[in-house]
């Protein structure tokens, strides 16, 4: 498996992804395959609830629950009637896509904090939940883009937020090695996995392991594709966490590195497949190509 502690050109491949993805067997049922629960979308960004839910279903999981505002539940069900509404037993959570940290409700903040602090269910933390990641005690994957990384870092004590000049910008726009170091130091300080989105997506764990994912295409630079990725990451995580549960063991945060890299690989490959020889794609096109990307990794 590529990635590791040493400095080398680690790159996540289809074979690596196949080692993480679970193909159901005759012994499986929906709960053994895994349940992912999402707290995504808001009145401001209702579409993110649909995109993240679709990303989760299309990646392959036993059940998707969605627990968001009643006013937008109809959108989720219209697209995916198989989605179960409300919180409940889950193997993994996805929090924050389509939520704005500055305007989210007290109820949203309280529920997300509780999910991140109570119990041991692992979580994918995106967009409007990133500022809460430093408070988490459950195993987690944070999925910021470059503009969001500071939301994770400031509560950890990195940099200062009252100056005009962003201390991160020159480090992120510098050479690749410096970018990797930023991601790795954030993961160590967080005690969680960091997945920094971009043309090359970088994944690092608190134990110092890291890898790079280059399966995507610039056609992915379109609104909503990150919401699809969050759902996909939740589904892969739920599958791995459910397998650990069936084996009677708790999932370790280091296992979340390969999970995050595999989700990014699937998402990038889905984008590339959707864009064909080179044409515009939408976020839903990416979600719809996820099953083909899965098959490209596993050969099923
Ligand atoms: N249809 C929907 O419901 C959509 C909902 N979305 C949600 O909208 C909320 C706001 O997310 P946004 O990221 O759009 O906006 P934000 O306003 O949070 O962040 C964008 C800021 O970061 C900067 N930036 C720096 N590097 C960037 C990069 N690589 N990619 C993007 N921005 C970068 C931008 O210049 C901008 O100032 C999130 O909750 C997100 O999940 C978006 O995913 C778009 C689609
Ligand atoms: N130039 C690019 N090349 C390849 N992938 C890209 C490029 N730009 C963005 N992406 C991918 O597209 C997705 C964008 O996610 P994000 O920035 O969160 O968008 P949104 O918030 O609109 O959903 C990420 O998975 C990222 O890796």
Image (cartoon, helix red, strand yellow):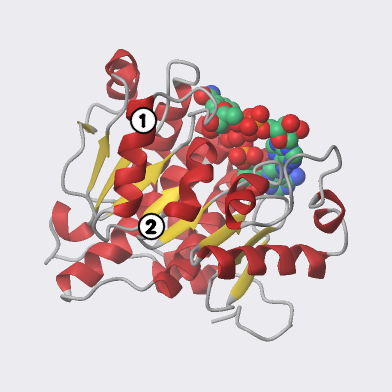
Q: State which image quarter holds ligand 1.
A: top right
Q: In the rendered view, would you say 164 is above or below 139?
A: above
Residue 108: mark? 1
Name the quadrant containing residue 208. Answer: bottom right
| Image location of residue 278, percent across then percent down | 73, 39
Viewer-closest of 247 and 78 = 247
Mark 1, other Cα within 10 Å: few <14 / some 14–19 / many ≥20: many
Residue at the outermost top position = 71
Q: In the rendered view, would you say 119 is above or below 273?
A: below
Residue 63: mark? none
- The local secondary structure at tag 1 comes to helix
Viewer-closest of 230 and 78 = 230
The answer to whether residue 84 is visible is yes
The answer to whether residue 282 is visible is no
Mark closer to the chain start, 1 or 2 = 1
| Image location of residue 29, percent across then percent down | 12, 56
Viewer-closest of 277 and 227 = 227
Residue labelled with disc 2: 236
Residue at 42% across, 27% down: 41
Give left or right: position of 282 versus 171: left
């Amino acid at each position: 498996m590529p990635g590791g502690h040493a400095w080398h050109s680690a790159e996540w491949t289809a074979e690596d992804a196949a080692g993480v993805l679970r193909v159901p067997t005759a012994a499986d049922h929906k709960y053994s395959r895994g349940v992912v629960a999402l707290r995504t979308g808001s009145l401001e960004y209702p579409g993110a609830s649909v995109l993240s839910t679709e990303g989760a279903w299309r990646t392959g999981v036993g059940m998707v629950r969605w627990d968001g505002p009643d006013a937008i539940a109809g959108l989720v069900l219209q697209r995916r009637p198989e989605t179960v509404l409300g919180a409940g037993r889950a193997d993994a959570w996805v929090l924050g896509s389509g939520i704005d940290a500055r305007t989210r409700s007290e109820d949203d903040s309280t529920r997300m904090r509780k999910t991140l602090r109570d119990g041991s269910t692992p979580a994918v933390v995106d967009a409007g939940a990133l500022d809460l990641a430093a408070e988490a005690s459950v195993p987690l994957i944070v999925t910021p883009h470059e503009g969001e990384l500071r939301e994770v870092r400031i509560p950890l004590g990195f940099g200062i937020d009252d100056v005009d000049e962003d201390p991160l910008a020159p480090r992120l726009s510098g050479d690749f090695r410096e970018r990797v170091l930023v991601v790795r130091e954030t993961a160590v300080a967080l005690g969680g996995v960091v997945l920094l989105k971009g043309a090359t997506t970088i994944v690092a764990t608190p134990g110092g392991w890291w890898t790079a994912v280059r399966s995507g295409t610039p056609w992915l630079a379109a609104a909503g594709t990150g919401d699809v990725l969050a759902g996909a990451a939740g589904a892969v995580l739920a599958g791995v966490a459910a397998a650990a549960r069936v084996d009677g063991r708790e999932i370790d945060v280091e296992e979340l590195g390969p999970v995050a890299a595999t989700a990014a690989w699937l998402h990038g490959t889905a984008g590339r497949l959707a864009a064909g020889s080179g044409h515009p794609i939408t976020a839903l096109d990416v979600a719809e190509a996820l099953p083909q990307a899965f098959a490209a990794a596993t050969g099923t």
